Amino acid sequence: MALAQTECQSSVMNSPPAAVESGPTAVLGPWRKVRSGVYVAVAEPESVNLGLIVGTDRALLIDTGSSPAQGRAVRDSIADVTDHPLAAVVVTHWHYDHAFGLAAFSDVPRIAHESVHIRLSSADAVADARRLGVDPDDLLQPTRNIAVATAIDLGDRRVEIAHLGRGHTDGDLVVVVPDADVLFAGDLIESAGPPSFGQDSVPDEWPATVDSVIGLMTAATLAVPGHGEPVDREFVFEQRGRIAAEAAARGRSAGRELPLVSEPDLTGRRSPPTAPDPGLEV
Ligand SMILES: [Zn+2]
């Protein structure tokens, strides 16, 4: 089984880009209610799901579209749903189709995992911007960098934002709306196609991260993936298995597969563990 690289594109996944892309138009679909006070809109050309959670006093936007211009369109569209101010904007990870629209929210708290600000200033992000015809200097960084979790008060409801582990990237966040039993999974889960493995993915840890996502779900929970229609827990279970299989296949092909049980040496002591992945220095 081969899981393809799909919607969530980045220069780290692809060959060096050529000129500016002339792909499909950056169309923003209408906000569609999926649960009480919880809305989803699809932003083209990457068919990325954006989320809007509305409380009695404030609203929260999840992901921002593929460019500063699309971010402005997203911001304008929020008036179709609510006149409440935005408490914050959160990006589920650094990929351009989720994070480049941050530029339209200069006056709003911008939440991301602490690795995102490094990624967004990397050569990969600059390459993505140039390929899309976006001035890299126009990109805007998060203002609130979280390591594990935070919560946002919208008045009558609380929204929780958490980094459950690495997977699609090293800085995936999930957003949970407990009272509505909705979870936004970013690209940890996809229903428009197979999950997207890129060079910045962490295949070996992705299944365990999805286990944590599943742990937050009940049979009634609605999970909104980064791309595609909302799904239920059974779908996430099934996709977790596919991700684990793909991760194992990649480990084998890379010659990195380790024996399930390390063999003791002649003195009875086990071999020393391999060095941990240092990850990003933040
Ligand atoms: Zn992505």
Image: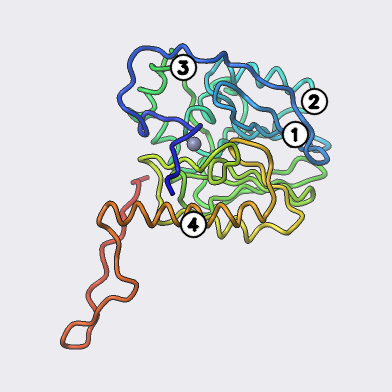
Q: Between residues 101 and 190, which one lies in front from this camera angle? A: 190
Q: Are marks 1 and 3 in contact (CB under 8 Å)?
A: no
Q: Nearer the viewer, mark 2 or mark 1?
A: 1
Q: Which mark is residue 138?
A: 3
Instruction: Report helix, strand or loop for mark 1.
Output: strand
Q: Sequence-wise, which precedes: disc 4 or disc 3? A: 3
Structural crowding at the residue carrying mark 1, measured as other residues with C-alpha within 10 Å and reported as few (<14), some (14–19) or many (≥20): some
Mark-to-mark CA distance, 1 and 4: 28 Å
Q: Between residues 33 and 94, which one lies in front from this camera angle? A: 33
Q: Sequence-wise, which precedes: disc 4 or disc 2? A: 2
Structural crowding at the residue carrying mark 3, measured as other residues with C-alpha within 10 Å and reported as few (<14), some (14–19) or many (≥20): some
Q: Are marks 4 and 3 in contact (CB under 8 Å)?
A: no
Q: Sequence-wise, which precedes: disc 2 or disc 1? A: 1
Q: Which mark is residue 207?
A: 4
Q: Sequence-wise, which precedes: disc 1 or disc 3? A: 1
Q: Which mark is residue 39?
A: 1
Q: Which mark is residue 29?
A: none
Question: Where does label 2 land, which residue?
Answer: 81
Mark-to-mark CA distance, 1 and 3: 28 Å
Residue at (64, 43) in percent of width and height = 184
Decide: is 10 above or below 239.
above
Residue type (three-letter) at the residue carrying disc 4: Pro
Mark-to-mark CA distance, 3 and 2: 27 Å
Residue at (52, 57) in percent of width and height = 241
Mark 2 vs ligand 1: CB below 8 Å: no
Q: Sequence-wise, which precedes: disc 1 or disc 4? A: 1
> Residue 161: horizontal and vertical position, in percent?
62, 47
Q: Nearer the viewer, mark 4 or mark 2?
A: 4
Mark-to-mark CA distance, 2 and 1: 9 Å
